[in-house]
Amino acid sequence: MAQIRNRQSGNGAASQSDQNGAKGQVLQTAPRVTLIPGDGVGPEVTGAAVRVLEAAGLLINWDVQQAGAGALKTLGTPIPDSLLNSLRRTRIALKGPLETQVGQGYRSINVYLRKTFNLYANLRPTRSFEGVQAPFRDVDLVVVRESTEDLYAGIEHQVTPGVVESVKVITARASTRIARFAFDYARRNRRKSVTAIHKANIMKLSDGLFLKCARRVAADYKDVTYDEQIVDAACMRLVTTPRAFDVLLLENLYGDIVSDLCAGLVGGLGMVPGANYGEKGAIFEAVHGTAPDIAGKNVANPVAAILSGAMLADYLDHKEAALRIRKAIGEVLRAGQTLTPDLGGKATTSEMTEAVLNAMTSVDARLSE
Ligand code: ATP
């Protein structure tokens, strides 16, 4: 039986089982991972992910940290030092969504964390599941989004009242790095093609540079087909023939928008997991936001967060556990009995999580036969 310890931390105090006996020794060797429950539906869906990871046999020493609107209320800052220190120590996190106000207030914490920890590659595997009502079956594509620059550089100023400027920053270094990530991913996962998505017909310098870098990298990967599409045309093709896409390579803003579009192809935001990778760490989080309209109602779809947990399991090299989690999710969706309202069902978040846990047991039994 797996053990997961939720430890409110920053204080470094050892739990009782850390201090005594064999359990403590096991925990010493368990990887430490920062757990950020987040705002809105975050605590509900990350709670589900933690339970499923535990059931899959992962031994994780959780370092629970507050951030976002919740932290602003209780600690007076949306990005507490204890959170940053925890991330500096663990370099890995499972994170719920964090609230960012529209048009005012503090800067996006998600953007801040990605920039601070140089998590430059945002990966969003998007695929159809049998049993889920969606516009298409058999969608299986991966969005690779650069996540440190572009219009997210946060350089905005007022030139004169009524006139503002936002600066789009594209560098050869970041464009080459993300292109290499996309091609490496494609090669490692036996994907056939990488499509760079751009608007270089209008933004000739910035998107032009992005494409130039992608083409240079593509030349080193003759085994992966490379093509390019203008973002508006790509959106139209995505909603008519999504199966024509494999790995999508995008700058930050197009990546953000196209990710949500792709989620719509496979049943909505509750279905798509995500991860932010850097050279030295990773943060795992669902594509969806805080979903304030359903927060605290126990109806959020936990699948995206649980699948983000599976990506974390892969990262920690627990490939078999990750596989078991994905199989269990597949079974629950296929059965169609215990689905949250966004998937057309009546189940609560807790009931759907229980169904996944039960499915894990049968998956385990079959795997051990
Ligand atoms: P934020 O500002 O934090 O991004 P938002 O409401 O603008 O919040 P999302 O949180 O991504 O954006 O939600 C968009 C819509 O999708 C909402 O109607 C929300 O209820 C729905 N949604 C998002 N996540 C889930 C989920 N896990 N389960 C069910 N519905 C969800």
Image: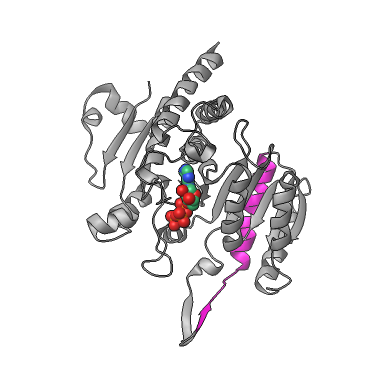
Can you give x and y, in whole percent of width and height, for residue 299 in the image? Answer: 42, 39
Does the magenta run of residues contain 312?
A: no
| Residue at position x 72%, y 56% in the image | 236
- Left or right position of 45 against 268: left
* Image quadrant occupied by the C terminus: top right
- Percent position (x, y) of residue 268? 56, 45
- Colour scheme in use: one colour
| Quarter of the image where one finds residue 326 | top right
Eyeballing the image, is 291 above or below 6?
below
Is residue 184 magenta-colored?
yes
| First to last magenta residue range | 163-189
- Give the residue at x 46% y 80%: 157
Looking at the picture, tell me which residue is in the foreground, 181 or 149.
149
Q: Nearer the viewer, residue 265 or 248?
A: 265
Can residue 36 be seen here? no
On screen, residue 320 versus residue 176, left or right, reads left
Would you say the magenta stretch is mainly helix, strand or loop? helix
Place of residue 151 in the rendered image (x, y in percent of width and height, measured from the top left): 54, 69
Residue drawn at point x = 55 percent, y = 14 percent: 366
Residue 108 found in image quarter:
bottom left
